[in-house]
Image (cartoon, helix red, strand yellow):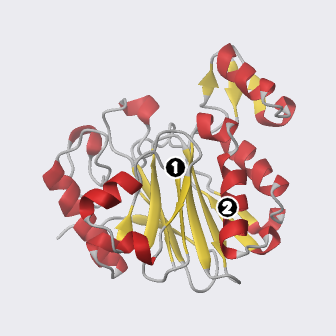
Amino acid sequence: MIQPKLDYYDLGAGVVAFSSTRHGGCSKGNYATFNINRYCGDTEEDIRSNRKALYQLLGISDNHLIMPHQVHLTKTIRIDEPFLALNASERQEALEGVDALMTNLSGICIGVSTADCIPVLLYDKERHAVCAIHAGWRGTVKRIVMKAVETMTITYGTKPKQLTAQIGPGISLDSFEVGDEVYETFAQEGFEMSAISLRKEKWHINLPECNRLQLIASGLTPQNIKISTVCTYKQANDYFSARRLGINSGRIFTGIML
């Protein structure tokens, strides 16, 4: 029997939050061993087995484990009763082109996939709502976390100061070397580059810090934001890294459930 090895986060009572590692599944090669992402080339049989192991560990059903097809944009959708009533093809259509999910329903695990990009989890204890966000460099430039906080505020009446956040495993400043065009994209979008970049032989961007600063700008209290110490590039034996393994490799699943 397989059992995924998860890194759990403490965001407070009433919520389960975690990131998967590369351990405890049945996938092979660059997908070894735990991958549930259907958009990166892994076999359907192994994905089904890994999904089953995860949803059974969480004590939920397969259709309550929800992950979008991400495209590095900023669309956030709400997982509610009407969504749960959709059939499989309708769900797939609804989840296409989505980079953040939110819900206020208990027993529904929402999550995002990453392999160097930055996953961000939000928990609103007062409004009983959660959000999972995929923030690659393109989504970070487009300020996806700020837009997700705003969407939670509109949808659930969330007050940002009452949110707790977890920034999950991703590529670190030291490892995220970028071309001048990426640096210029951030600069042109008005980011304070001295706070999020460093020049070595090439420019390096600090994606976790950039997302932390966006959360603060959205109204979150700095003390309520936690950051994983994992660099996926440096720790590719334990966490998937597309820069290390190539795009045809597994993905970390970072999930949250009321």
User: Where residue 137 sits: x, y (%)?
Assistant: 61, 35
Quarter of the picture containing the N terminus is: bottom left
The residue labelled by disc 2 is 151
* Circle 2 SS class: helix
**Which quadrant of the figure has residue 159?**
bottom right
Residue 63 visible = yes
- Mark 1 element type: loop
Residue at 69% of width from left, 31% of height from top? Answer: 205
Q: Residue at x 26, y 66 (%)?
A: 87
The answer to whether one can see residue 23 in this image is no
Q: Amino acid at mark 1?
A: Asp
Asked if the residues shown at circle 2 and circle 1 are in contact, with their CB atoms under 8 angstroms apart, the answer is no
Q: 3 above or below 75?
A: below
Going from the N terminus, do you reach mark 2 or mark 1 first? 1
Amino acid type indicated by mark 2: Thr
Foreground: disc 2 or disc 1? 2
86 left or right of 205 in image: left
> Going by the image, does 195 lie left or right of 21?
right
Judging depth in this view, the residue of 18 and 183 nearest the camera is 183
Q: Which residue is mark 1?
A: 99
Residue 214's x, y, as percent? 77, 49
Query: What numbered label is drawn on residue 168?
Result: none
